[in-house]
């Protein structure tokens, strides 16, 4: 039972040091996300001023949903979590050659429930739980989480790049949004190159790279330098999962598998609207490319970024009425983020975790 290991794993959560890198840096990312969200809200506000919003139309779009397609979307959304479990098992293999897949699945559902309820800081609940269940250092699972994010980011960037290449054929995005898309294209190329370089260096030159980075960070204070060294050691430890070609192939296959499930899930959501939304798979990929970056900003309990970006893209790029766009944005958020909550809460209760313990768990993982 997870509850019996709750306090025994508390010390591993401190391996990055008190007030570690996670806690000190997450506010910077939250601030950046908030700025991007405010820009999207400004653009959305302009759209609402032009079109207005009719609640009766919004409710009517939800009332006409095809539940067969909606149930299929929910099933696919839940299946993506199993894809994540298979990938994490590969990342865990150097420390645990045969990890318990059910425990990984349980920790994954609880972890993503924490993300929905606590916001992005809840991301660290999952690696913390896995470190406790599998009795491995939390730092190693934090490194696995970083590598997982890099693989996801590469696929998301590929989809986003595809979206940027095709979006010009989908009507008038307006001068402001066109400028943002143009800048976004250059950002995509830069970040993609950085991620590929990071993966290559981590795999081939992990220890020399760690030493060079430590030398370059010599200007930091002793306390900051110790925290940086702990984090880099954890990253090198996580890179052990990429030593073999088979492991890299499995990581790529499972990542692609996961994102194929996400794309088909989104397609099922559009099909649930019947004739009101006639999206091809190409349209779905364009929409997914933008929505995946909106998901970075998660306001605890209500989401935030994914809904705003979805509404903006659906109205400005695809030309959908604002009520229909809002309906689809809310439904995408419910299927993608909220569907897991009942299962995650049930598993947390089964493992002896209360809401208070879940909050304590998040604090332990980020301090």
Image: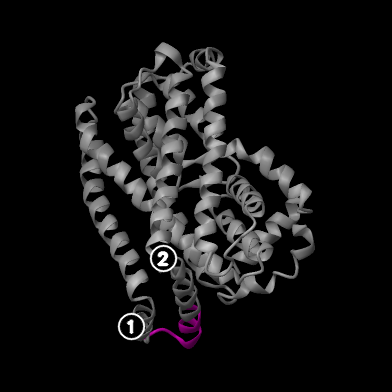
Give me the C-alpha separation between circle 2 and circle 1. 20 Å
Instruction: Assess disc 2: are there few (<14), some (14-19) or many (≥20) residues with their C-alpha within 10 Å of its C-alpha.
Output: many
Q: Is residue 32 visible?
A: no
Magenta stretch holds residue 221: yes
Which element is circle 1 on? helix
From the viewer's perspective, tell me whether residue 31 is left or right of residue 201: right
Task: Label the magenta part by its dominant secondary structure.
Answer: helix
Question: Residue 291: horizontal and vertical position, in percent?
Answer: 40, 38
Magenta stretch holds residue 186: no
Magenta residue span: 219-227
Mark toward the start of the polypeptide (2 vs 1): 1
Q: Which residue is mark 1?
A: 212
The residue sitting at 57% across, 24% down in the picture is 71
From the viewer's perspective, tell me whether residue 165 is left or right of residue 217: left
86 versus 206 height, above or below: above
Q: Which residue is mark 2?
A: 242
From the viewer's perspective, tell me whether residue 302 is left or right of residue 189: right
């Amino acid at each position: 039972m997870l509850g019996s290991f709750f306090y025994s794993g508390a010390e591993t959560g401190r391996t990055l040091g008190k007030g570690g890198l996670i806690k000190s840096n997450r506010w910077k990312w939250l601030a950046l996300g908030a700025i991007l969200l405010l820009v999207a809200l400004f653009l959305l506000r302009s759209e609402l001023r032009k079109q207005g919003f009719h609640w009766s139309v919004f409710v009517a779009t939800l009332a006409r949903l095809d539940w067969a397609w909606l149930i299929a979307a929910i099933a696919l959304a839940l299946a993506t979590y199993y894809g994540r479990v298979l990938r994490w098992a590969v990342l865990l293999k150097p420390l645990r050659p045969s990890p318990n897949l059910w425990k990984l699945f349980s920790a994954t559902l609880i972890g993503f429930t924490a993300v929905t309820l606590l916001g992005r800081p809840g991301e660290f609940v999952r690696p913390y739980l896995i470190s406790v269940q599998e009795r491995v250092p939390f730092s190693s699972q934090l490194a696995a989480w970083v590598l997982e994010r890099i693989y996801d980011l590469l696929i998301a960037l590929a989809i986003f790049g595809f979206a940027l290449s095709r979006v010009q054929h989908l009507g008038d995005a307006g001068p402001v949004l066109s400028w943002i898309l143009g800048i976004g294209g250059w950002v995509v190329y830069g970040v993609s190159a950085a991620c590929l370089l990071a993966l290559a260096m981590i795999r081939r030159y992990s220890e020399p790279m760690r030493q060079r980075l430590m030398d370059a960070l010599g200007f930091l204070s002793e306390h900051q330098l110790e925290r940086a060294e702990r984090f880099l050691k954890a990253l090198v430890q996580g890179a052990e999962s990429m030593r073999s070609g088979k492991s890299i192939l499995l990581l790529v296959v499972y990542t692609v598998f996961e994102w194929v499930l996400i794309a088909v899930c989104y397609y099922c959501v559009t099909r649930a609207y019947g004739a009101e939304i006639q999206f091809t798979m190409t349209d779905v990929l364009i929409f997914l490319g933008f929505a995946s970056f909106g998901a970075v900003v998660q306001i605890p309990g209500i989401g935030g970024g994914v809904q705003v970006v979805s509404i903006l893209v659906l109205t400005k790029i695809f030309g959908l009425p604002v009520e229909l766009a809002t309906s689809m944005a809310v439904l995408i958020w419910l299927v993608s983020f909220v569907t897991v909550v009942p299962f995650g809460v049930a598993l947390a209760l089964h493992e002896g975790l209360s809401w208070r313990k879940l909050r304590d768990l998040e604090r332990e993982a980020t301090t």
